[in-house]
Image (cartoon, helix red, strand yellow):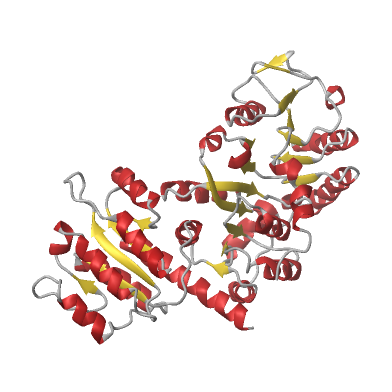
Amino acid sequence: MGLKDERGLVDSYRPLFYPRSIAVVGASDNPFKLGFQALKAVMSAGFKGEVYPVNPGADSVVQGIRSYKSVAELPDGVDLYVYAIPDDKVIDAVRQAAGRGGKAGVIFAGGFRETGESGRLRQRELVDAAATAGMKLIGPNCIGVLNTHAHLNATFAAPLGMLPAGNVSVVSQSGGVGTCIISQLTDELASIGKFISIGDRANIEFSDMVEYLAADEDTSVTCLFVEGLDDGRDFFERASDVSGLKPLLACNLGHTEHSTRTALSHTGSVASSEVVYRGAFAQAGILQADSVEQMVLAAKALSMGAVLGGNGVFLSTHTAGPAIVITDRCEKNGVRFPDLNPEVADAMLEFLPPHAVPANPLDMFAFAWTDARLYLKATELALSQDDIHCAIAVFQSGMGSGITFPAREYASIGRKYGKPVFLCLTAPAMFAQEMAGIQAEGVPTYNRAEKTASAIIALTRLHSLQSKATSD
């Protein structure tokens, strides 16, 4: 299981993800034009290479940069072309770039395969134009490409260039859902490595990106939003080859009558049976999340190295309500809360507060809120059990009271046993700084019981998939 030519694969996509030069075709000084936003996005990300604005009707300087009247005026071999022009001009523009040794392109305009047979024919013409130079195309009908590790923002959304570099990469057929995934990851304080709005998939498919990101040293986990696949067999075969290298998560929607119709008009993709996709994803070792949110929650934990070795969980709390929510949802989805071994239970009795029963889940009442060291003692003992594979602590934020959760010590216990530890920190979003501090210690943290349960359910499913793949 793996990649045959990893170095060659990475090198083939260098002009797209690590370009040395970018031409923005259609660049403009008019803030109401897409070409303005595209050039602004490239510049605001702090791109280090050469940038060439191209617009036959523009002044000699656009946004403070020397402008060019045509692609013919550019140096040969520009790595990446960003096309912020109408669809009826795209094919000729790509043909010109290919003639000058262009290596990659991003096409925002729609009007291709998603419009029907005439659009499909135009997309074939577009692919043929790029093929003369071997140009790799993202789109058409997309919002572009982001690589935080290369200060690359080849989209028309300048704020994306402000995101910190991370190790979660996202490939989405839908630009809108893709940005929602990015927003949710950001809210969860998980950082993006690469974002590919794959759009109508001119000559780069999901399978290509799955292989590339498996070889990409800056990616630890890949998230996919799939509306439909044209060549499902090719995708699942290639995904099966690499899914064991890094976690691969997917969310696949568009199975109802109206959502299928929307998918077809959106990116020209034909959805298929939900049951078929779920079975095929599982066979390929891909975790299919129940929702975009669950995919994000699981990706966050995985990006922090939280991989489960089984489905046994120890839960400790000082407040019963959230713990009930977590255990109820988890147990309904195959997660186990093993009984404590007699010796573990006896050891807990030595420090538990009055009336607390040594059990799993473990309720230590408000005593554990004022003395959070109780969590450390309980978790240390519980993780010594072979049938317990991770720990969850439920803790109410101190919200400025001076009471804080001992995250560093808690994380250290998890590392000692080689088992991930999680925290459900019930706190409002305004206390995100508290969450950031805890996660900096290596503890995946969620601010709602429902989120915590959703993440654990997804991680146990992934373990099951990986175990089955290993046994097969």
Q: Residue at x 38, y 57 (%)?
A: 443
- Which quadrant would residue 446 be assigned to in this image? bottom left
- Residue 204: x, y in percent? 75, 53
Q: Where the C terminus falls, by quadrant?
A: bottom right
Q: Quadrant of the N terminus?
A: bottom right
Instruction: Identify the residue at image location x=59%, y=23%.
Output: 31
Q: Toward the viewer: 437 or 170?
A: 437
Q: Is residue 167 left or right of residue 316?
A: right
Q: Nearer the viewer, residue 33 or 195?
A: 195
Q: Residue furthest top?
A: 60
The residue depicted at 60 percent of the width and 47 percent of the height is 195
**Given the current orientation, which residue lies at the most extreme bottom position?**
342
Name the one closer to the observer, 386 or 425: 386
- Residue 337 x %, y %: 33, 79
Q: Position of residue 36 (x, y in %)?
A: 63, 25
The answer to whether any part of residue 171 appears in the image is yes
Residue 54 in which image quadrant: top right
Q: Is residue 176 visible?
A: no
Q: Is residue 326 left or right of residue 135?
A: left
At 78% from the left and 59% from the top, the residue drawn is 5
Labels in figure, total: 0
Asked if residue 394 is positioned above or below residue 12 in the image, the reply reads below
Query: Which residue is farthest front?
Result: 416
List x then y, in percent, for residue 442. Answer: 40, 55
